[in-house]
Every structure is written in C-alpha cells, then in structure tokens.
Image: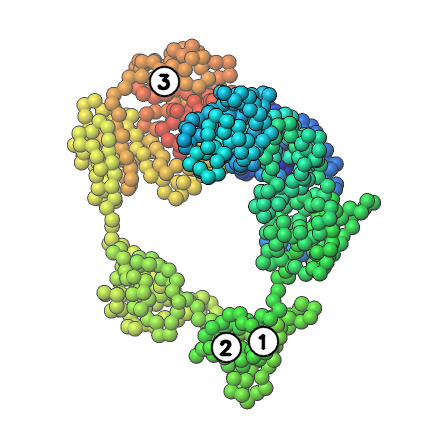
Amino acid sequence: MKIQKLFSVFLFALMLGSTSLLMAQTMSDQQVLEYVKEGIKQGKEQKQMAAELARKGVTKEQAMRVKELYEKQNNVDTAKSTGTDANESRLREEMKENTSDMLEDQPTTQDLVREDQVFGRNIFNTKNLTFEPSSNLATPPNYRLGPGDEVIIDIWGASQNTIRQQISPDGTINIQKIGPVYLSGLTVSEANDYLKKSLNKIYNGLNNATDPSSDIRLTLGNIRTIQINVMGEVVQPGTYALSSFSTVFHALYRAGGVSDIGSLRNVQLVRNGKKLATIDVYEFIMKGNAQDDIRLQEGDVVIVPAYDVLVKISGKVKRPMRFEMKKDEPLSTLIKYAGGFEADAFTRSLRVVRQNGQEYEVNTVKDIDYSVYQMRNGDVVTAEAILNRFTNKLEIRGAVYRPGIYQLSGKLNTVRELVNEAQGLTGDAFLNRAVLYRQREDLTTEVLSVDIKPIMEGTAPNIALLKNDILYIPSIHDLEDRGNVRVHGEIAKPDSYPYADNMTLEDLIIQAGGLREAASTVRVDVSRRIKNPRSTVDNDTIGQMFSFALKDGFVIDGQPGFVLQPYDEVYVRRSPGYQAQQNVSIEGEILFDGTYALTSREERLSDLINKAGGATNYAYLRGAKLTRVANASEKKRMSDVIRLMRRQLGEAMIDSLGIAVENTFTVGIDLEKALKNPKSNADLVLREGDIISIPKNTNTVSIDGAVMVPNTVSYLAGQDIDYYINQSGGYSDNAKKSKKFIVYMNGQVTKVKGNGKKQIEPGCEIIVPSKVKKNVNVGEILGYATSFSSLGMMIASVANLIKK
C-alpha cells in the first residue's frame, strides 16, 4: 500500500512536470515501472524521479499507462477510493473556500502519505528493530529445558567436576555412575535442585545445609532451536526455526510483520491447543510494557487475526495517522494514541465522518463526550485549527516610540492608555488627526477620525477601544512628499539617497563616496523638476538644469553651497580627456607576439604589425584572422539571427546545436593588402580586445557539403572549381550546384562565380549546400559549423541558407 501511494503521487508529479518533451520514448512501460519501484526503495524524492524519467523521454501518456499496469499487477481496485476517506476528502473540498483563511498552513504531500499509514504496523518490518534475542544473556532461572539444549553442571567444594552434555531427544542426560537423568520440561531452577539431589549419591555434602562449601550450578551452553508457527494475517505465514530464547515479537518480525488487514491489538499465542495469551502490541509501543512479549516454546502457534476497528485521525494532532482500536475504546484513547493536540488545534470539538450502514454521516463530538464516544471501523476524525483571529488584540502604528500589538484588557482599553503604553508620541507626530480602523460585527471595516492632541491633554473625552482596533498616528513627514535625490555617472557609489533639509551638492557628493578618477571637475549637472502646485496653465518648460565646476569635491564655479531639493538628480560627467589603456593582441607568425596598448584612436592593422616587428618569412598573410569582442549592438544582431533560426528550424534543433550569442566574432580582413596600402580601407582601425592571428603558409583546399566524399587536397594554382569537386568524387544527388560558396582562412565568405579559378586560394574551404529548402539537415549544419571561424559568421551563413 505504501508503494502504491507513493507511486500514485509520483505519477501525478510526472504528469504535471512533463508537458513538453522533445526526446523520443526510450524506456518501455515495464522499465519505467521497475525504475519507479526501485527509486521509492532508495528513498528518492518524487520530483527527482519525475525529472530523471522526463529526461529519459517518459511522456504523460506513458505515465498513465504505467499507473494502470501497476494497478493491474497488484490487483488495485480503484473503486475502493469511494469509502470514508473519499467522503472526507469531498467534504474538505466543499469547505475549502470557507476554511482556507482560517488554517495557518495546508498539509503537504508528505503529511498526506503519513496519514495513510497505520501506526505501529512498520515496527516488525524495519531493520532497526528486529526483536532478536541476545545470545549473551545470563541463564534465566525460569527457562524450561528441552531436547537440544546444552547444560553445563559445575561442582565445587569437597569434590570438583564439570559436566557438559546436550539433552537427548528423549529429554535426558547421561551421568556416569548415575545413568540417565530426565531434565526436559524443568526450569533451570528446578533442574538445579533436582541434580543436587541426584548427584549427592556420588558427591557427598551437596545436600548438606550445614556445609555450604560444596554446591553445584547448572547453566546453559548452546541453546536449542525450536519450531513455531506464525499464522493468520502476516506477510509470510509459515513455520519458522527460532532460538529457544525467542519471543512473540521476534516471531512476528521473522514473518515480515502484519499484513494490511492484520491486527496489532489482538495477537494470540496458542500452546498445546489452548490460547495462552492475547498480546496488545500498542501496550509495548505506547507504554514500553514488554510483559506480553512471551518467550516461545516448541510447537507454539502465533495467530494474527484481522483487525476489528481501524480509524483515521488527521488535522491538528501531533501524530496524524491511522490507528487500530479495540471495540470498546473511546475517542479519548485515540487522541492519546495520536500524541494529543497540536498547539493551534481547536480542542472543544472534533468532526467524525462515519459509515452508518446505509450512507455517510458527520458527527460533531464535544470535548465532554470524548471519553464516552466509542470508535467504529472506518471512522475518520478531523481536528480543525483555531480561528485565525484574536480575542483581545490592539495595534498602534505610526509616530509612537513603540508601535506594535498590545493586549486589550481592563487597564488598557482607551486611546490615551494605548498611546502611553507605546511610550508616548514621537516629536514628529501629527497631532491634529489620527485614524482609528475598527472592524464591525459583519467583518467590514470603518474608519474613525481621532483628534489626538486634546485626548492626550485631557481636554477631550477619551475614546474606548474594541478588540482588533488599529490606531494610526501619522508623522508630519508622512503628509509631505520628501522624495529622494539621485546621483549618476562618475561617482564612487551612484545611487538614490534620502533627502534631508539643507542638503547641498557637496554633501551629496561626499555621501556618495566622492568623484571617480574619470570624473570631469568642470561639468557636474543638476536636473530639477518644475513644481508649481498653484499653476492653472500648461508650461513648455519640463525641467531646470544647473551646471557646476568642482575642486576637491567643492563648488568653485556656480552657486556655492547649492541646496538640493527633493527629486533632484545629479549627473557627474566623464572627462573627455580621460582615457584608460586599451589593449590588443597579436599571435602566430610574428616576430614579437603578445599584448600591445593602443596609442591612437586611428591605430590600424599595419601599425600593430610594425610594433610587433613584422611578420616572419613563414607567415601566410592572406589567411590572417581578426577576432573582435562583440559590443551590445553586435550581440543584439546575433540574437536576432538566432531568433530567426529558431522560427525556421525549431527550438529542439537549435538547442541540439548549442547555438547561443557569444562574446566574440570574426572580422574578415586582407592583411596582405593592408600592409601594401597602409591607411587604406583594407587597413582596418583596431579597437580594444582585438586579437590578430597570423597562420603559417598552407597549401591545401578542403571540399565539404553535398559531395560524394568530403576531402582535403593540395592547392594547385590555376585549377577551377570543378577540379576540386572531382577530387571529392563529384556532386551528390542533392547538391545545390548553383549555390556553392568558399570560406577563407581569414573568415571571409564568398559565392563561387564562374569557374572560380581566381577565387580559390590556399587554406580555403569549398562548401556545396544541399537542395533541401524547407528543413535544413542537422548533420549538414554541423558540417558547415566546422568551416566557420566563429558563431557570428555561422549563424549569418545558416540564416542565408534558410532564406534561399
């Protein structure tokens, strides 16, 4: 039942969490079922299992199928949910709108699962409590000997000896010079006395009370194994071989505990065909009373009948669960079993939903009847929470020294006393008008105006307070819009700051941590709102601007000691003469690679090459590449292209490709031409973060895309495009021949024109796209992606493919 409950809750969580799955189903229904069962055994949370199965492709429909499969395999009858619990749940739903505002918290899924467990039923199926007897116990004097027990007889005094024998199947031990001595059925104490008399025949003085120096003692060695039967409503009824020290509780543990309908209150021990005892497990659980845990004997039968009364208690009790009750036990006993009421429980009455044989009925049981109201099988008891309101609450807010909640009492029941209890009015209290919020009997609220000054002076009648009254005394500052002032720009802590009377521009700059290094001291602007509450005409002016020059944080040009007003905004400008270092890097076939600082806004490719000592003799200048850090506008452009691709290709394909906006992109350059013609258009102006990469000479051409065999071959000057296509086995059947394009090492892309002789260069890659128009193949895009030197170029090229 526990697995069924957890499994049903899990499936519900999975159905909620797996509304959109892109992965195909990869697990069979039986595999999902076994996965869930194993997860529950391991103690995994339902959300965790739902997420794991969702990633494996389990859909909502498959979850429903698996639930039906589980119910079929376990003979779960869904019609059983129409019992008392279902009616209690229905009643809760009907009352939900009326009671939800009264409950402080709602039960969680874990609470609901716990409420369906039967108290005490898991005591015999947990590894932490086996009830296995200890083999190191001292020999109990009331232990009855039987065949298979090993007895140790120690003799000391005038004669000394030790006899160690096992009781034979006929119940005897064989002692030299005496013969067989029958011990089976005797207790250890009785056997000790009997042996003393028997051994006195050959050991003098054992029976002599006047000579206590000689005596014998019988103890147990290896104890025997007994067979007992556990029958009735247990998980695994049958015959069990147990230690002769075993008790009824250990027998129940070995049988797997009681079943779903087994009783814990009426366990019967039958010995020699007669009922020896009736055992109540709750006596042990609740009171620690182990006297009913009787030691078993050979042939004993433990019988677990079905329960008589099973009830459920939920709500505001310490242990909301199902409990097995005896037929004569009242509601007060159930409350004790549940640990008593929670602190916020309504204890004056309980609601009981009962089956009367024809239909369901609701009984409201008063607290005086708890001890006489007897429980019946199937009862569902609910302890409600107390109302979410106060019987004697007063509250005061606003301009007092100790605002908060106070007790309405005989000494504190007027406005003046409430203010005095709150340590009096603050200096900024507005005394002409306070507000008293009062709740009427119909739960609506009315507002009463209070002139607080004469009440506190005693010149006006005091006002009596009622429960739940809220007195608000405003501050004079609450009645005026003080606003804040804000500072922007090159300031240490740009932020909004509370306005204070006589706050100057210098005060605000000091409060904001002072000027930054990049701040301009000749241009600090203050923007001010236009405020004219008496104006009756529109005004074209929407703001005022004041400009200042500063030195050491003080105004030197403009109105000194300029006083700010609420909502003023200060702008500390950046000095146009301030420039932080801007670095670029160069790597590859260059004499002095590394990082260099730009010294001019117009510094170009050729300038950087000269700074770095020029290219080496092995440099391939045509293949040089420029990697640039993307600014905000460039990132937005890439993001727009990705959105276009998502619409055309779908979310799943873009996610599988891992396409996202990156921080860098490649700029196509012609370094060879830039060095031949410095300051020309080919000689690009550098900017911070640029990285120039100059490769070694290369002599290959790659062919990819819709060809028979993608290949890389040697570059031969003067060969046309068909030569290189033939080196890859020619075009494939779906090749779009007219859309061939070339990707160069420097990041440039160009469409093939004519035979392409003049366009093909060492290190380039020839790509033949596919004829697919509506849906671009994922493998094809991935193939193209390896040819592009950056994401920015790849998404731009793929977007062009989609459009064509």
- Where is residue 496 drawn, in percent x and y? 39, 62
Q: Secondary structure at mark 1?
A: loop
Cα gap from disc 1 to disc 2, whole angstroms: 12 Å
Inspect the image, locate mark 1, and give the three-letter code of the amino acid beneath it: Ser
Of the two numbered discs 1 and 3 on the same chain, state the one appearing first in sequence. Answer: 1
Mark 3, other Cα within 10 Å: few <14 / some 14–19 / many ≥20: many
Could you tell me how far apart the alpha carbons at marks 3 and 2 are, in whole angstroms?
Answer: 89 Å
Task: Looking at the image, tell me whether mark 1 or mark 2 is earlier in sequence order.
Answer: 1
Q: Whole-percent x and y of residue 750?
A: 39, 26
Under circle 3, the secondary element is strand
| One can see residue 16 in this view | no
Q: Quadrant of residue 586 in the image?
A: top left
Q: Is residue 464 visible?
A: yes
From the viewer's side, name the closer residue of 375 and 423: 375
State which mark lies toward you, 1 or 3: 1
Q: Which mark is residue 421?
A: 2
Q: What label sits on residue 702 in the rendered view? A: 3
In the displayed structure, does residue 550 sit left or right of residue 73?
A: left
Residue where numbered disc 1 is placed: 409
Query: Is disc 3 in contact with disc 2, using a CB cutoff of under 8 Å?
Result: no
> Which of pointers 3 and 2 lies earlier in the amino acid sequence?
2
Residue type at mark 2? Glu
Indicate whether 537 appears above or below 795. below
Residue at screen point 59% across, 78% down: 410
x and y, in percent, of residue 330 in the image: 71, 52
491 and 306: which is toward the camera: 306
Determine the residue located farthest toward the right in the rendered image: 358
Check whether the beta carbons of the residues at disc 1 and disc 3 lie within 8 A of each other.
no
Of circles 1 and 2, the one toward us is 1
Residue drawn at 28 percent across, 28 percent down = 624
